[in-house]
């Protein structure tokens, strides 16, 4: 009876939705009190090894389970699965949940999850943080930081073209992400394209889906098979040659040129009828001269930047680090250009009132 009395005296505070939470219990059985985490695996300090991570990642080091997340809306569909906007029931924070159905061997799955840890351990503010990955009932679920202005695909759809000053600001951030991947982590992204470059209302641009294309390939049974679009793939990759970091630079060049001219550079117009067949496109990428920025419409700095990226021979392409110092990026560095204002003026990809 003594025990009952002390139980009655125990005070539990219910966290308010928007207030910073100090203590709570997730359905996966992890008790959080500030930085302290306690579950079956023991006790640990959440922030002990996270000193240098972006503030976002430091804030959320929850060992939550899928049951802690409620679905709000489907954001989009890719070739490998769907992306949903979800809310964490306890902290009220939004995330993007990507669910990929797959049926692969245990050892390959472990290897993939290991690769995804690069996202999870990312110390770069220009890589979308992947907070968690779960494997459950033949599907991998990835909990990503939610980017509330969608992808560059959404931005181009509305704006049609992006002016050079904004492109320079956007490109600088993508390059910072690539410098981190290439020069610090020594990895190739392999799938740089508009839908994998995400933006938020603060005007931040971040690269996503690192490691995901490799995962999709594995789910198809072959580690080296590519799943997704070939449009942005470098000539050396299409021809089956060895490739390196410079492959991502080719893709970046095509994306930036597409944003400037308002159409995929290997086609003459966005009209579906003018699109080449799959094989014609691959042939054009491998055999035709690379696309260039028209010098009568764009600044010499922009034209030079594009040509430093879109070179058939990877040796002729600049590195991400060199491109960060390119005159096109430098030209707008101290001009106070606010990408946040530009993207916030657009229709958001998710309308919460519908
Ligand atoms: P593919 O699967 O062929 O590579 P994709 O990149 O468009 O194509 P997904 O990665 O599944 O496919 O993404 C689908 C859409 O979901 C994207 O176009 C993007 O707009 C949106 N999306 C993905 N991740 C996030 C995120 N973290 N925050 C907000 N929106 C996201
Ligand atoms: Mg994607």
Image (cartoon, helix red, strand yellow):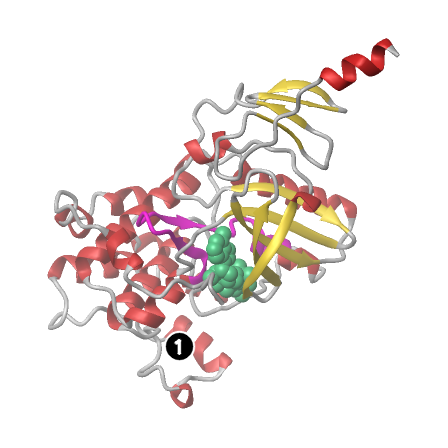
Q: In which quarter of the image is the N terminus?
A: top right
Q: Where is residue 142 in the image (x, y as percent from the top left)?
A: 61, 48
Q: Mark 1 points at which residue?
A: 284
Residue 262 belongs to magenta span = no
Which residue is farthest top? Answer: 2
Q: Where is residue 135 in the image (x, y as percent from the top left)?
A: 72, 47
Is residue 239 in view?
no
Query: What range of the chain is rendered magenta?
Result: 195-215
The residue positioned 83% from the left and 16% from the top of the image is: 4
Q: Nearer the viewer, residue 236 or 148?
A: 148
Q: Nearer the viewer, residue 47 or 278?
A: 47
How many neighbours does mark 1 have within 10 angstroms: few (below 14), some (14-19), or many (20 or more)? some
Which residue is farthest bottom? Answer: 273
Q: How many labels does the image show?
A: 1
Drawn side of residue 105 relative to residue 197, left or right: right
Q: Position of residue 146 (x, y in %)?
A: 48, 49
Is residue 261 in view?
yes
The residue positioned 45% from the left and 82% from the top of the image is: 280
Ligand 1 contact, mark 1 (Cβ < 8 Å): no
The residue positioned 46% from the left and 39% from the top of the image is: 186
Q: Where is residue 345 in the image (x, y as percent from the top left)?
A: 28, 61
Drawn side of residue 305 relative to residue 157, left or right: left
Residue 205 belongs to magenta span = yes
Quarter of the view holding residue 68 = top right
Tag 1 secondary structure: helix
The residue positioned 21% from the left and 68% from the top of the image is: 293
**122 vs 147: above or below:** above
Drawn side of residue 210 relative to residue 297, left or right: right
Q: Nearer the viewer, residue 249 or 298?
A: 298
């Amino acid at each position: 009876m003594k025990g009952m009395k002390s139980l009655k005296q125990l005070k539990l505070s219910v966290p308010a939705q928007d207030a910073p939470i100090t203590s709570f219990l997730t359905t996966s059985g992890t008790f959080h009190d500030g930085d302290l985490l306690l579950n079956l695996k023991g006790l640990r300090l959440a922030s002990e090894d996270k000193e240098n991570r972006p503030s976002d990642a430091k804030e959320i080091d929850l060992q939550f389970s899928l049951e802690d997340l409620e679905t709000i809306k489907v954001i989009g569909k890719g070739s490998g699965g769907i992306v949903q906007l979800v809310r964490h029931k306890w902290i009220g924070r939004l995330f993007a949940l990507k669910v990929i159905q797959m049926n692969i061997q245990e050892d390959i799955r472990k290897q993939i999850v290991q690769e995804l840890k690069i996202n999870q351990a990312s110390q770069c503010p220009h890589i979308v943080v992947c907070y968690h990955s779960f494997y459950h009932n033949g599907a991998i679920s990835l909990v990503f930081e939610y980017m509330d202005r969608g992808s560059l695909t959404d931005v181009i759809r509305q704006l049609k073209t992006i002016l050079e000053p904004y492109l320079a600001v956007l490109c600088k951030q993508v390059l910072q992400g690539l410098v981190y991947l290439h020069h610090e982590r020594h990895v190739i992204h392999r799938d740089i394209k508009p839908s994998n470059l995400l933006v938020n209302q603060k005007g931040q641009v971040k690269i996503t889906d690192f490691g995901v294309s490799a995962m999709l390939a594995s789910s198809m049974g072959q580690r080296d098979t590519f799943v997704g679009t070939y449009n942005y793939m470098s000539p050396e990759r299409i021809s089956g040659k060895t490739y390196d970091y410079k492959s991502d630079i080719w893709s970046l060049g095509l994306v930036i040129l597409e944003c400037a001219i308002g159409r995929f550079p290997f086609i003459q117009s966005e009209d579906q009828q003018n699109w080449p067949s799959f094989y014609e496109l691959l042939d054009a990428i491998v055999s035709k001269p690379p696309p260039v920025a028209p010098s009568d419409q764009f600044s010499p700095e922009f034209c030079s930047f594009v040509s430093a990226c879109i070179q058939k021979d990877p040796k002729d392409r600049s590195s991400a680090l060199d491109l960060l110092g390119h005159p096109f990026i430098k030209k707008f560095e101290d001009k106070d250009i606010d990408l946040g204002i530009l993207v916030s003026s657009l229709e958001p990809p998710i309308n919460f009132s519908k």
